[in-house]
Image: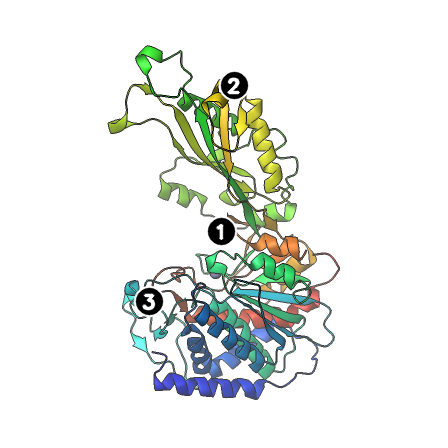
Amino acid sequence: MVNRPEIRLGVALGLALLSAHARPLHAQPSVSATAARTAARVYREQHEGAILTEFAALLSLPNVASDSVNIRRNADHLIGMLKARSFTSTRLLIVPGGPPAVYGELMQPGATKTLVLYAHYDGQPVDASQWTTPPFSPVLRTKEVHLGGAVIPIPVGNGRVDGEARIYGRGAGDDKGSIQAILSALDAMRASQLASSVNIKVFFEGEEEAGSGHLEQILTTYADQLRGDAWLFCDGPVHQSGRQQLSFGQRGSAGFELTLFGPTRALHSGHYGNWAPNPAMMIATLLDSMRDDDGRIRIAGYYDDVKPVTAAEHRAVAQLPKYDSTLRTALGLSRTEAGNALLAERIMLPALNVRGIRVGGVRETGSNTIATEAYASIDLRLVPGQTPARVRRLVEAHIRAQGFWITHDSVTVAMRLAHLKVARVEWGSGYPASRAPMDGPFGKAVIAALTEGVSQPLVLNPTVGASGPTYMFEQILKVPMISLPIANYDDNQHAADENLRVQNLWDGIELYAALLTSIGRTWRGPLP
Ligand SMILES: [Zn+2]
């Protein structure tokens, strides 16, 4: 589809429009976020076709992280898009064996703060047979494809596009849409003579969907370039209600596989029950000793290094959309833990979850035997202050305190004979949590810039429940990071027919224009 003549023509027109705006801006007295939103809207309404044409060209480049040739084409293309906006120091940040990250900066004379914008240009692998139209041949549809949305041409030049239209292609929602919104916002600001209130750096990662295996090395190697006062993680969908959401943190994670041992061969439970130790009961007792019915972890010292939840975080949770009881009903739960405490409160606390238990057989495989081994798989979610290393020490100390001798390797009969109780503990990789302060100067400035002139209140999440790489920015670069998503929640990210609702792109352009134009007005102080 990208070879359709109207797209080729549109690319040329789009780039011509961009370069027309690519002249240096004089510092302007900063304007309000509301004025910047209005200016961005007016600009966008005059350039909808050109913006979508440029976006379609980016989406037409296959972007699976393992496809190094096409990943490089994406990276080079992005460098071109940055240069068209007068970014300086544009370059690829490369470490051995990994896809490049794309970097550029836009320094603003007189600005005292530097904001780094993160997005990723790679996407999840695709199974083209599952897509209605090929994943790297972007198309615009009048509405969602499963609701009968018909393919329509991307208008040339200043043709208009309805906000309910959707653009389909891998990366549309996750996460090339954020890149397009940022760059189109800069075009709108330049066209309206609105200066950024901060220095801007962009960092576009090329292997987020493949697990960010080289991110730590890139951040360490290029720490000087990447220095800034704070980062925005521009990725993910907005709240299901359609409201703009900010998330200040992600949970950390650690996990282990636990094995306990009974007799070396399965025993008849009639002949040997009450005599041979039963690993099924041992593992039930041990797990019960780790966590109470309300989720409080009973391991000694476990909460000692947990940073307390702040008053600002409790306040934010109290203002989140109320959906716990709807969720309980939908899930068939008459109650949830800790007296129906709010989900958003619960994910700010450390958690110990049992992923699974396996011992003996049940139902059709049930038999009157005492099993030889019992297995459990445990997932620990960490919160700020905790480290995977200390959590490992505390968990093992707890298991020892229950009378077990611990090994991390294979277990021999000699070991079983030498100790009253033996536990094998095998740890997976782990990483810490991150959570930017909601009432710190950066958090307050982001909230102020995005609240002004907006009727819908922001959804402010102290943390999301899932774990992710944001801790690396906090730990390696020592700066706070806040997540600012723009995609529609029903964007089919990671799946077939990934799309971006056009209105979310339009809103994103206004949002970035408002943020960049006004955040410097309230962002003060040396602290995060
Ligand atoms: Zn993403």
Q: Amino acid at mark 1?
A: Pro
Quadrant of the snapshot with the N terminus: bottom left
Q: CA distance from mark 1 to mark 2?
A: 57 Å
Residue 454 appears at what percent x and percent y? 55, 66
Asked if residue 39 can be seen in this view, the reply is no
Q: Which badge, 1 or 2, comes first in the chain's sequence? A: 1
In-image side of 256 versus 164 (left or right): right
Q: Nearer the viewer, mark 1 or mark 2?
A: 2
Q: Which labelled disc corresponds to residue 426?
A: none
In-image side of 228 versus 3 (left or right): right
Residue under the image location 39 percent in, 21 percent down: 264
488 is higher (above) or lower (below) than 313: below
Identify the secondary structure beneath mark 1: loop
Q: Residues within 10 Å of mark 3 (few under 14, many from 20)?
A: many
- Identify the residue under disc 3: 144
Q: Which badge, 3 or 2, comes first in the chain's sequence? A: 3
Q: Amino acid at mark 3?
A: Glu
Q: Amino acid at mark 2?
A: Ala
- Identify the residue under disc 2: 418
Q: Which labelled disc corresponds to residue 321?
A: 1
Identify the secondary structure beneath mark 2: helix
243 is higher (above) or lower (below) than 267: below
Q: Tell me, yes or no, whether the two marked residues, 1 and 2, touch with CB atoms within 8 Å.
A: no
Residue under the image location 53 percent in, 42 percent down: 254
Q: Tell me, yes or no, whether the two marked residues, 3 and 1, touch with CB atoms within 8 Å.
A: no
Q: Nearer the viewer, mark 3 or mark 1?
A: 3
190 is higher (above) or lower (below) than 199: below
Distance from mark 2 CB to nearest ligand 1 atom below 8 Å: no
Identify the secondary structure beneath mark 3: loop
